[in-house]
Image (cartoon, helix red, strand yellow):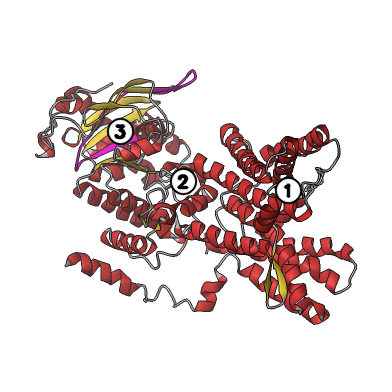
Amino acid sequence: MNAKQIDQQTLLRNEADPLTHTPVHLLSLEGVGKHYGNIVALRDVTMAVDNGRVTCVLGDNGAGKSTLIKIIAGLHQHDEGALQIMGEERKFTSPREALDAGIATVYQDLAVVPLMPIWRNFFLGSELTTGKGPFQRMDVQAMKDITKKELADMGIDLRDVEQPIGQLSGGERQCVAIARAVYFGAKVLILDEPTAALGVKQSGVVLRYILQARDRGLGVIFITHNPHHAFPVGDRFLLLKRGKSIGYYDKKDISLDELTAQMAGGAELAELAHELEQLGGHGDVVKEVQAEVADVTHSAETPRESSPRHA
Amino acid sequence: MTATNTLKRPAAAIKDERIGKRNPLQKLLGRPEVGALVGAIVLFIFFASVSQTFIQPNAFATVLYGSSTIGIMAVGVSLLMIGGEFDLSTGVAVISSALTASMFSWYFSVNVWVGVVLALVVSLGIGYINGWILMKTKLPSFIVTLATFLMLTGLNLGLTRLIGGGVSSPSISSMDGFVSAKAVFSSSVNIGGVDVKNTVFIWIALVAVASWVLLRTKVGNWIFAVGGDENAARAVGVPVKATKIGLFMAVGFCGWVLGMHNLFAFDAVQSGEGVGNEFLYIIAAVIGGCLLTGGYGSAVGGAIGAFIFGMANKGIVYAQWNPDWFKFFLGLMLLLATIVNLIVKRRAELK
C-alpha cells in the first residue's frame, strides 16, 4: 500500500498493481509513439496511472507533453505502441470516446466558453435533462444547484453561477474545470499545465485540488514543466525530452533536486552560471546559481547509477 | 452534515462584500436584446409622433406583417449566428424553395402539397449541404455560403426558364391543393376588425420555439458553445458537426416557411428575386444583439431586429417621406447596434 514500497521494476511491468491490488493498471502506455508526417513528435513512451495516484509528466517546451495528452484524450491517435484502459487495449478516435472511457482532460485553455455562464459550462456536453421526447429540456435548477454544491465542495467560493465564466480568475476557472471532471465520474484526470499561468498562491490552490482529486480515488496525470510543482504532489514522474522518455521514476527513487537536474540538464545550468558571471552580474546571484549547479550536478550523477532508467 | 454546511457557507457568501445586489434594471441591461429593445421603443415613439396613421390598428398590422416576412428568416439566421456561422444564401434559398414547389407541381400536374413537401426536402437539403461543406472543408462560412448563393441564383433563373419557359414560375392558383395550402401559408385572421396576416403568428411561434430550444434544451447549450468556442465545445464532447449542420438546416426550414408564404400569397414567383434579402436577415439578427463572432445573442433579439426593420420600412411611408432615406436609416441602426453589442461583449469578457 505504501508508495515507497513500489519498486521501479514493478512500475514498468504491466502486472499486478501493487498500489490498488487490482490486476491491471487503470491506464497504461506501452512504447507509445506518434509522428506527424515525417516529424516524430513522440516515441517509445511508457507510463502507468492508478487510482489515487498522481503521475507527473515533466518536460520543457516541445518535449511532447501536449502530444502525449492529446493521444490519451482522444484528439490524436498513436501510431506505435499500446494504450490500455484496465488492461484492455484502446485507441480513441474522438474526445467523446475517451470521456466515455472515464478520461477527462482539463486543457491549458481549459475548454470553457468564456461568454457562457458557469453552470452552462460546468454541464456542457453532459447536460441534465427532464421530460420526454420533443419536450425534453434541461433541468436548469438542478444544474445550477449541483454546480454550486460541487464547487463549494472543492472549496471554491463562488459569487454567482450565472456569471460568464470569462469573468473568473485563471485559478478559479481551473478549479471549475477540475470540479467538472471530478463530478462527471472521471477515473483518469489529465491536467495540462494547470499552474503555468498562475501566481504562487493560485498555484498552491490548484495543487491542493489535485490532491483532493487524488484522494477521491482518481488517477491523475499532471503535466507541467515545473518540478517544484510536480514533486510535492506526484507519485511517479515521467520525464520527456524532445519527444522521448528520458526517465520514469517512483517518488522514492528520486529527489526534487535530481528531478530538476534531469529536466534542465546540469551542464546547461553551469553554462548559465558562467554566462551570468561574464555579464558581471550580481555577485550573490552568481554564487547562488553556482551553488545550485554544484548541488544539482552532484545529485544528478547518483541516480543514474543506482536506478535503472527507462528509455 | 458537512456537505450541507459547505453548501450553505458560500451561499451566504453570495451576499457578502464582493457582489452588490444586482437590481432588476441592471439584470435587464445584461440581456443581449436590450439595445434593440430600447431602439425599437425609441423608433416606435418617433414614428407615432410624426405620423397619425402609424398607430392605427390597420397600419400597425401592416408593420407587423412586414416585420414577420423578415422575422421568420431572422429566427433561423439568429440561431446560426449564435452558433458562430452565417449564411449568405438565405435570400435566394427562399426563392429556390418557392420555385421548387410551384414548378414541380405545375410540371407534373400534381397536388401542390406534393410540391410543398418536396420544397421542404430541398430547403433542408440546401442547409445540409452548406453545413456539410463547411464542416468538411473548414472554410469560412462566408465563402461557402457565398458560393451557394451564386449557384442558387443561377439555378433559379436557369431552371425556371428551362422548365417554365419564362422568368417567373407559372401561376398555380387553379391547381389542386392551392386553396388549402394558401390557408396554411398565407391567410388572414380578423382580430377586432383588423386583418392580421397569419405569418405574424407563425413568426411569433417560431420565435417562441427557438427561444425555448436556445435557453432550455441541451441543443441550445451546444449552439452557444459551438459559437463561443468551437474547440472547447468539441473537447468536452459536444457534437460540433451535427450542431452546425442542424443550424443550417434550421435556416433552411425557415426559408421554406417564407418561400411557401411568398408562393401562396402571389401564386407565382419571380426567379430573380431574393438577392440581397440575406443581408436584411443578418441585419435583423445583428441589430437584435447577436454577435457576428458567435456565442452570444437571442432569438427574441432577432425578432426585435426584424420589428425595427418593419417599423422603419413602413414608418417612412406612413410619415410620407421619401423612401430613399430608408437604407440610410438601416445602415445607421446597424452601426449603432453593432457598437452596443461590442460594448456588451467587452464588459462580459473583461469586466
Q: Earlier in the sequence, mark 2 or mark 1?
A: 1
Q: Residue furthest top?
A: A38
Depicted B233 relative to depicted B137: above or below: below
Q: Report the chain holding disc 1.
A: B
Mark number, residue B233: 2
Q: Secondary structure at mark 2?
A: helix
Residue A170 appears in the figure: no
Q: Which residues are magenta?
A: A34-60
- Between residue B62 and residue A209, name the one nearer to us: B62
Mark number, residue A261: 3
- Between residue B327 and residue B91, name the one nearer to us: B91
Mark number, residue B91: 1
User: Of circles 2 and 1, which is in front?
Assistant: 1
Q: In terms of secondary structure, what is the magenta stretch mainly?
A: strand
Give the spatial CA distance, label 3 vs label 2: 39 Å
Q: Secondary structure at mark 3?
A: helix
User: Of circles 1 and 3, which is in front?
Assistant: 1
Q: Report the chain holding disc 2.
A: B
Residue at the image position 30 percent from the left and 33 percent from the top: A261
Residue B243 drawn at (x, y percent): 51, 44
A6 horizontally vs B303: left or right: left
Q: Are marks 2 and 1 in contact (CB under 8 Å)?
A: no
B174 horizontally vs A98: left or right: right
Amino acid type at mark 2: Ala
Question: Badge 1 local density, few (<14 within 10 Å), some, or many (20+)?
Answer: many
Residue A68 drawn at (x, y percent): 37, 31
Question: Badge 3 local density, few (<14 within 10 Å), some, or many (20+)?
Answer: many
